[in-house]
Image (cartoon, rainbow, N blue to C red):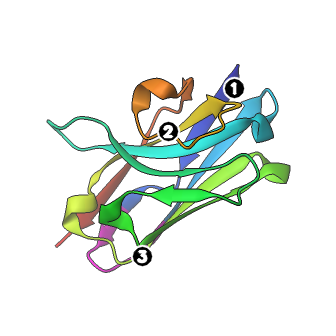
Amino acid sequence: QVQLVESGGGLVQAGGSLRLSCAGSGRTFSNYVMGWFRQAPGKEREFVAAISLSGRTRYDTDSVKGRFTISRDNAKNTVYLQMNSLKPEDTAVYYCAADYSAVVLHRTPHEYDYWGQGTQVTVSS
């Protein structure tokens, strides 16, 4: 299995930026499609972005297009989520997830095999 640890969350004003990191350990990191999800209080876990094994293919949900960018560095076993122009509605716990040897970029949580513990992002207005 793979262990995932997120970092980089915090409190930021609207319009600001944060960069989340997710460090993986255990099995070969490059064998996993990586995704970011978020969950706000009282809401279901929501897909944010996903990136293919090589990093060449990326998919973002509409609400973050043009503001968030997912990337990965397989040499460092790390996936990133650069978040710019943050809005109060981006406030949530952000989770990274790993999908073993996937050939498509899944958007539903149940498709992912491993999860990190989450990192809180709070955007003040």
Dot 3 falls on a residue whose secondary structure is loop
Of mark 2 and mark 1, the one earlier in the sequence is 1
Q: Which residues are magenta?
A: 11-18
Q: Residue at x 73, y 46 (%)?
A: 53
How busy is the neighbourhood of tag 2: few (under 14 within 10 Å), some, or many (20 plus)? some
Q: Which mark is residue 2?
A: 1
Measure the alpha-carbon separation of dots 1 and 3. 30 Å
Residue annotated with mark 2:
106
How busy is the neighbourhood of tag 1: few (under 14 within 10 Å), some, or many (20 plus)? some
| Residue 106 in the figure: left or right of residue 34 | left
Asked if residue 14 lies in the magenta stretch, the reply is yes
The amino acid beneath tag 3 is Gly
Choose mark 1 or mark 3, whichever is in front: 3
User: To which quarter of the image does residue 77 belong?
Assistant: top right
Q: Residue at x 80, y 50 (%)?
A: 74
User: To which quarter of the image does residue 121 belong?
Assistant: bottom left
Contact between labelled residues 3 and 1, with CB atoms less than 8 Å apart: no
Of mark 1 and mark 3, the one earlier in the sequence is 1
The C terminus, quarter of image? bottom left
Q: Which mark is residue 66?
A: 3
Of mark 3 and mark 2, the one earlier in the sequence is 3
